[in-house]
Image (cartoon, helix red, strand yellow):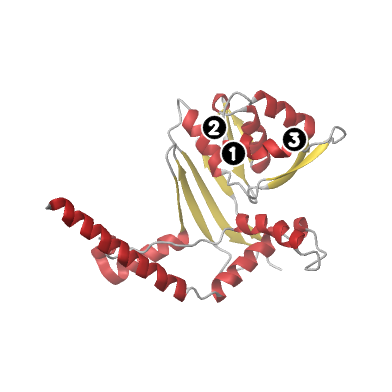
Amino acid sequence: MADYFSPTIVQPTIPNADMTALERLILGYIFDSEADGDGLYFFAEIAPSDSFELATDRLRTAFADSADIPSALRDQLTDRVAQIGDDDTDVEIDLSGMSWEFIFQDIVKRSTTLDHVSVVTSFTCSKMRPDGFGGMAILITADAIRGKSTEDILCELFDEAEHGSLAVAPGFGKHVLLRLSERSVRAGIPVITESDETLTAIPADAITDAEIRAACLDVAAHTDLSEERGAAEFRAALAAIRAAEHRQAGAL
């Protein structure tokens, strides 16, 4: 069986003063980290984690210390903290329904020194499988989160090879309508298994990230969205017609 890895680096160093206590705690479980001056350098040797266990007293303390600073992470964990029992010493945190990019975006929004955070991920595999290699670069600013994968880059290169300089001109663009997110698939598994107890006896957390990735690749390879693409092209054509009508009406 092949093992899939996603080693990741985050740049630049994140100042401690720009993170809430809760963000600093949780990012330290999602990523590995090293102290760098007055901040932390985040990275993941194998892959970022979206589920982990931590001590309830640490979570409660960090949660309380971050009460005065709005953040997407605190909103995400509010219900989970409320569910912790008085006798619980440890708590399972599942962030598969939330992208860690939004944690960094909140940090950039409030920072006086950072105007962006960049994240670079490599997709590697323990075997030389053609679906096991690639990468992703993400740029996080206060206003947007933008990413581009090696697959996106190859699509752009194919366009340039076919159309030359016209590949970047209006009329030759290609637009992604759907991405199959492994995090979203992970988040959907408990919903599926809880809604149908006869489906499987396997607990949701027994399904590995490698199995989810392999399943996503298989579904992507065997799914035909030609009808949906045709419908989207039709709607885009109508929208372009309406835009042209609006433009011409405004010019009269």
Task: Compute the Cα span from label 1 to label 2.
Answer: 8 Å
Badge nearest the viewer, 3 or 1 = 3
- Residue 75: x and y in percent read 62, 36
Residue under label 3: 82
Dividing the picture into quarters, in which one does residue 190 lie? bottom right
* Badge 1 element: strand
Residue on which disc 2 sits:
14
Query: Are there few (<14), some (14-19), or many (20+) residues within 10 Å of tag 2?
Result: many
Q: Nearer the viewer, residue 170 or 195?
A: 195
Q: Is residue 129 visible?
A: no
Please, is residue 136 above or below residue 160 in the view?
Answer: above
- Residue 95 is at least partly visible in this image: yes
Q: Position of residue 166 (x, y in %)?
A: 24, 64
Q: Amino acid at mark 3?
A: Ala
In the structure shown, which secondary structural element does the residue marked by tag 2 occupy? strand
Does the CB distance between marks 3 and 1 fall below 8 Å? no
